[in-house]
Amino acid sequence: MAWANNVLRVNLTDGTTSNEPLNMEWARLYLGQRGLATKYLVEEIDARCDALSPDNKLIMTTGPLTGTMASTAGRYSVVTKSPLTGAVACSNSGGFIGAELKAAGYDMIIFEGKSPQPVYLYVENDKVDIVPADEIWGQSVWAADEWLHKKYQDPLLRIAAVGRAAEKGCLYAAIVNDLHRAAGRSGVGTVMASKNLKAVAVRGTKGVGNIKDPAGFMQAVNDGKQVLAENAVTGQGLPTYGTQVLMNVINEVGAMPTRNMREVQFEGASKISAEAMHEPRESDGKPNLVTNAGCFGCTIACGRISTIDRGHFSIENKPQYWGASGGLEYEAAWALGSDTGVDDMDALTYANFICNEDGIDPISFGATVAAAMELYQIGAITKEQTDGVELKFGSAEALTWATEVTCKGEGFGQELGMGSKRLCEKYGHPDLSMTVKGQEFPAYDPRGIQGMGLTYATSNRGACHLRSYTVSSEVMGVPVKTDPLETEGKPELVKAFQDATAIVDSSGLCVFTTFAWTLEDIAPQVAAACEGDWTPESMLEAGERIWNLEREFNLAAGLTAADDTLPKRLLTEPAQTGPAKGHVNRLHEMLPKYYEVRGWNKQGEPTDETRQRLSL
Amino acid sequence: MLRALQIEPEKCTGCLQCELACSYQAEGVFNPAKSRIKVFTFHDEGRFVPYTCTQCSEAWCMHACPVEAIVLNEETGSKDVLADVCVGCKVCTIACPFGTVNYNQDTKVVYKCDLCGGDPECAKACPTAAITYVDADHTGLGRMRAHAAASAGAN
């Protein structure tokens, strides 16, 4: 079996660690990673606990395919209760640490309690140490990474850490691994810091073996790699342009949220697009993009490695930012750019660098700055709060200042670190917060792409595109083209995407494979590696089980059907330009039907029949 | 015809498919820690560079071995470690100027690239053709062609 069959439990309160076998009965129902760790969380914590109290647990988890040669199989997730939303959090990251953890012999690490002092966890195969972190507490992720690599004299050590923002309580702090990959959303980094856990450093030399059917697995893996290579999106679009390939496309569709979602098209989109990242700069003739990069085992390689123009104001006299690092992905470019009205690509790249350096989610951060800019525009926030900075839409200087103070948790950065919901409530305009369940929207305006409205409203972790990326169908025509302005059929579409994504996220694979792969391509890889009956049908059913399990956690945490909604702006203020001109999101046409196809009652609760059918 | 591994770092994305394929072929486990080929990341430059044994003709490792545990494979040109002869003295790891022979603490003998007996898995696994297995007499052919194309204004 591809599971390591080994769970590492770390009690931070007592400073003790222990090992236990993986619950294989649950693994057969929930596969791994997102699904399986959620099952552990549901069973082990009180859903009503304070997310930042020692009662919450934080699970770093791999999937059964993590660490194998299947394309993209280096993913890991962090599962916990979110301090931003109060709902279940599950943030997925690539890079290399997930595979390293698996190679060290673990399926997951469950962190419990709270350390009395700052510590980090060092894992070298069976050797596990909880070590005082005095030298790196108060430092950025990048500084902690460098310090740990120096201390252990081991360039192959893989590190995940939280930065200063998490320590200062920013509610959307990320856990950054391998310098610029992140378990980014829902404040999983905030939970980690609340436990006085600064970093996890892993070295695994055992590798991943125990493949059920090695020959069958390699055949399925090679077939899968070929499908990815031959597909236009995964074979050409993503490696060449990254996720930023979407910037101009979504802008033309009229679903590019702009200036805190007041508008749906951004006049500066082409200046911050993938194409612009390839253009040589005037100053040194080099483009922003240095190269594309792959995470562990990934044959798509959508990652961006970029540099900032050395003459740009943001990095003047700051040589530490003159080298290459993780560049703009579409979500970051949108949130830091279009949503704040800033079209200065170097400023966005700098903001993105330091979001990685100190571990904050650029989506929630950019969207919070956008809300703050609107509050500033209407006079609800003044220079008194912003240390004299003119927090205007379109100001690159305001953006880079806001990023710096939020990353360090200083001054107004503390308020930005609350997220847009709390910020807008504090300044008396809750309707200006573009959030669902307290989590900020990603880069698709649901007035222009109707299915995404239902996606956001019902996402188990608050507004999120990665829970059911119906853009794939509604804009790109994968697997079938649907009309983005129609609501008919969207409840079924959203459910199908939610269930399929839940099981992909539970396998150790990257959801981006699904531009080319269906479960018909994925199931043979899982089935050859793992015990159990893994077919496209059984995987989809497991995905549905996972979705309902997450829903039940949220209901137990106190969320209700009333939380399955969208900000008033998107339901009442029509898009003013583009193909969606005149449209609002018609959530009310979709939500009741969605509950019905889910097998939930009118209160949005799974019925007994549904629970029974899914063995919940 | 003898073939050689040709590595073109500018095509590498750092995905480690080569390390996975290598370790799986040689050890039966997906384990970059035991791969004969290694990919190095130069973070600040944004460069990824795979590196492995070049199979020297007058191989330092082979000459240095006191028990003749490293032998020439006439068919592929590779210098192969005879694991049951190797005594784990590590002299070859010191002799190799490139660091591509290494000691395995689990097996207690050294290991190095053996070109998988003439069908290297790393080259097959690489998704971007950054690693290819080409005519050993003409590993420069691709670069020659590129320069020829440039001088002719062709593609």
Image (cartoon, coloured by chain):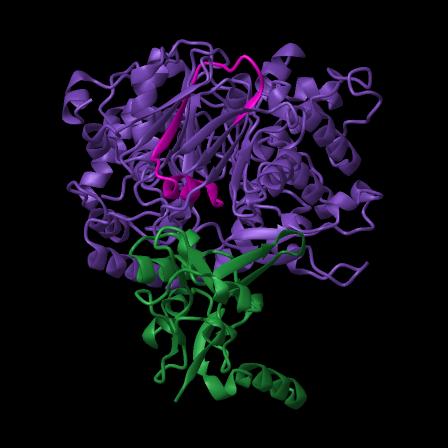
Q: Quadrant of the N terminus of chain A?
A: top left
Q: Position of residue B10 (x, y in %)?
A: 58, 67
Q: Which residue occupies 44% across, 48% down?
A: A475
| Residue A275 seen in render | no
Residue B42, placed above or below residue A483:
below
Q: Residue at x 52, y 33 (%)?
A: A184
> Residue B111 appears at what percent x and percent y?
40, 63
Q: Is residue A109 magenta?
A: yes
Which residue does the image show at 38% across and 37% down from the upper left? A468
Q: Is residue A196 left or right of residue A18?
A: right
* The C terminus of chain A sits in image quarter: top left
| Magenta span contains residue A601 | no
Q: Which range is magenta?
A: A94-120
Q: Position of residue A600 (x, y in %)?
A: 25, 20
Image position, residue A8 (x, y; %): 36, 28
Give the drawing colour for chain A. Answer: purple
- Locate residue B84 relative to residue A262 in the image: left or right: left
- Chain B display color: green
A237 is higher (above) or lower (below) than A504: below
